[in-house]
Each structure stands twice: as C-alpha cells, then as structure tokens.
Image (spheres, grey):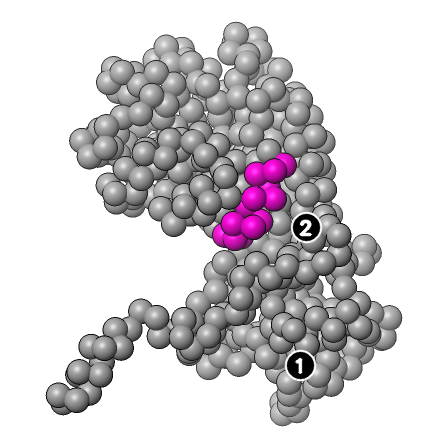
Amino acid sequence: MPAKNFPLSKTQLEELAKTYPTPFYVYDEAAIRKNAQAVKSAFSVFPGFIEHFAVKALPNPFILKILADEGFGADCSSYPELLLADMAGIKGEKMMFTSNETPAREFKAARDMGAVINLDDFTHIEFLEKNVGLPELISCRYNPGPLKGGNAIIGKPEEAKYGFTREQIVEGFRLLKEKGVKRFALHTMVASNELNMDYHIETARILFEFAVEIKNRTGVRLEFVNLGGGVGIPYRPEQEAVDYSKLAAGIMQVYNAVIVPAGLDPLGIRTEWGRVITGPYGWLVARAVHTKSIYREYIGLDSCMADLMRPALYGAYHHISIPGKETAPADETYDVVGSLCENNDKFAVQRLLPKIVPGDFVVVHDAGAHGRAMGFNYNGKLRCGELLLRTDGSMLPVRRSETVQDYFATLDMAALDKFMAAN
Ligand SMILES: *Cc1c(COP(=O)(O)O)cnc(C)c1O
C-alpha cells in the first residue's frame, strides 16, 4: 500500500503554527508543478493540447499563476472566476467559460475578455446573439444522455441538467454556421472523480465519433473537442492514480481509428481537469482540541466542514495522518469531528488511527481540490487560510484566515446603528 505523503514534519508544523495558528491549508508548489509537467508531457502527443484548469477546484490566483507558468489555461464558470484567471495572467482563448443558467452580463464579460464561450443549451444561441452578439468561436456542451453510463458524483447524464441533446447539437451547429460563426468546438463533462481510464477513453470516442457525424451532417469541421474534467485521484491509500501517458495513448488510439480516416486530423484536444491537478498536493492541517468518550470515541478538531465539506456532503473518504505518529500502531477507532452543529460534520467515521491526544496535529490528505473552495460560513464559522510551500522550502501565505470583520463585511453597519437608535 503506497504511503500517503505530507511534506512537513511535526517539528516544522510546530514552528509554522507559531505564525499561522491551525487550521490552515498547505499546498506543495513543487509537486503541483511536477504533476502539471507530467500532464503536459503525456498529452504533447496531441499538437496544441491545452489543459484548462477548472478554477472552481482551487480558486486561488497564486495557484493559477503557477499553472499558467506551466502552460495551462483556465476553465471558468462565473464572472469572479474569469477575474481570477485574468489576475493570474490567463487571457483570451486560454479561458473556457463553461457556465449554466448564465445571466446576460456574465456572457458579456466572457465575450469582452475573449474567453471561449461554451454554451449549455440550444436556447442560449439566441440568448447570446440577442444580448451580447455571437463571437467568431463557439463551443457547445454535449450531454450524451443514455449513451454514457453514470458516475457516483455526477450521476447519470440523462438526469443531468447540463448540455444539449445529440440532435440539438447538430441543429445548433447548423444554426451557428448560418448566423456567421466561423470556428466551432464540442465539449462534454460526464464524470467526476473517475479513476477508471477506460471511462475517459470512451468519452473521447463518443466525442470523436460525434465530430465525424457533425461534419457529415452539417459541414461544420470542429477546431477542437474538450473532454471535460472528472479524472479521479486515489483518495484511499490502496487506490491507484490514473497513468497520464497510458490515458493519452488510449485516446490517441481512438483518434487514429476515428478522426484520421475521416480526414478530420488535426483536431485539437482540450481537457478541463481540476481535482487531479491539485487535489493530492493540498492538505488541511488542524489540531485535536478535545477527546470525548461516549457511545463512540471522538476526536474534536479546531476545524470543521466549513473548511472541507466533502466528507459531510458525499461521505467522501479523506485519508488522515498524525504527524509524529506515522509509525505508531493504528489501533484506536475514532470519529474525527468538527465543531459545526451538524451531526454529519465528521472528517472520518469509525477510522482506525494511532492514539490521539489534544494538541496533536491532524492532517487531512487530498484536500487540494474542492476543499477550501467549497467552504462556507454557516454557524458563523470563519474559513481558514491557505499557505503555499514554495519550491525553495519557504512558506508563502496565499490567503489569510477569515476574521469577524470579513463575516460582517456584507452588513451595512451605519444603517444598523441608525436602525438600533430608531427602534
Ligand atoms: C467541475 C468541473 C470540472 C472539473 O472537474 P474535476 O472533477 O475537478 O476534474 C471541469 N469542467 C466542468 C464543466 C466542471 O463543472
């Protein structure tokens, strides 16, 4: 079983916690860069390949800048995410704008910034034309419906709200061409946290075959297909990571079988992976503050699901380790819990761990994607900050922890004072 890695020792954490009290996130720059380079190198078999990092997974401009340095673009789902990408120097068509139920003003912002707009519905063609005008390049999101089997987090495509049906895509490209659009792309996103490589190769096949059909039925030749996100990570120590080179080779095989004989080579390949890019290289570091012995044994942390909600939301497994006790026998069974007034606020349920005492650091692994990003303020919980472990070993704070001032920032205090005085 491969051991789960954490880049800091207990002594280093003790030192760090003097400046940055727990809880906090730590991201490992060297590991993120190395991983980004591995993705790029594996997919360099496809000329012009671009990975558009899904900003929602880790919406921090410091991280986006690192990924931009490695040649990545961004996949944005809202105006604030477009701004984050822009801040990090990711510009124009390096940005995909994949949104749904999109207001006109967000389409306008995406258009003004030159992002590739990825339409979620047939009716959005007219909506975009009427409110913003049609750009030269348009991508459409395909929902393959019953053609594609389901996946635990994202569910069955035919039950998902996203995308055009097959016939709507064909009609959509006809209409876009008629309206003068010059460049076209096809997108899909049908999986989340999927470790099975064949699932992703099959997604590529569906898009490639559809690209051929679209050409035959409408004359539209696609510039690129975007395979979406959804590549999984091994949250459990016994799971295995997806091998990027094998995945790229598998997709290439289908490309050679479908795209090349149809005369559609070169067709650009894009991805918008989030989780697999940063997930394994981020950790939530908390401390045990209480132990409690009732019908079960509990370890209470100074963090809660407001900092990391995946376990509570999906029952997701996140590995936990106790710095300084790496080799201690894991012979205690604990529920490791947060402080929120919700009984599902548990980082781990009935988990075998070494004996934990108050003051011990508790490291939650694989929290570098869909972690801090999904945080919230329910119960008046203040979200924790983020630290970046630089390649030279130094630590850079890339987001401070929230304060009560942040929590009150949306209240109009002057209006409140008046209201208090008058009532
Ligand atoms: C969430 C999402 C992604 C990223 O998914 P991961 O599972 O993090 O790879 C990519 N594209 C779209 C449209 C998404 O909604």
**Looking at the picture, does residue 331 appear above or below residue 162?**
below
**Looking at the picture, does residue 382 appear above or below residue 244?**
below
Q: Which residues are magenta?
A: 58-70
How far apart, in angstroms, are the residues tagged by discs 1 and 2?
27 Å
Mark 1: few/some/many CA within 10 Å (<14, 14-19, 20+): many
**Total marks placed:** 2
Q: Position of residue 18 (x, y in %)?
A: 68, 77
**Could you say which disc has been placed on residue 288 in the image?**
1
Residue drawn at point x = 53 percent, y = 21 percent = 268
Question: Could you tell whether 53 is left or right of 247 in the image?
Answer: left
Question: Could you tell whether 7 is left or right of 292 in the image?
Answer: right
Residue 229 seen anywhere in this rendered image of the structure: no
User: Magenta span has 286?
Assistant: no
**Residue toward you, 361 or 164:** 361
Residue drawn at point x = 61 percent, y = 20 percent = 47
Residue flagged by tag 2: what amino acid is it? Glu
Q: Quadrant of the N terminus?
A: bottom right
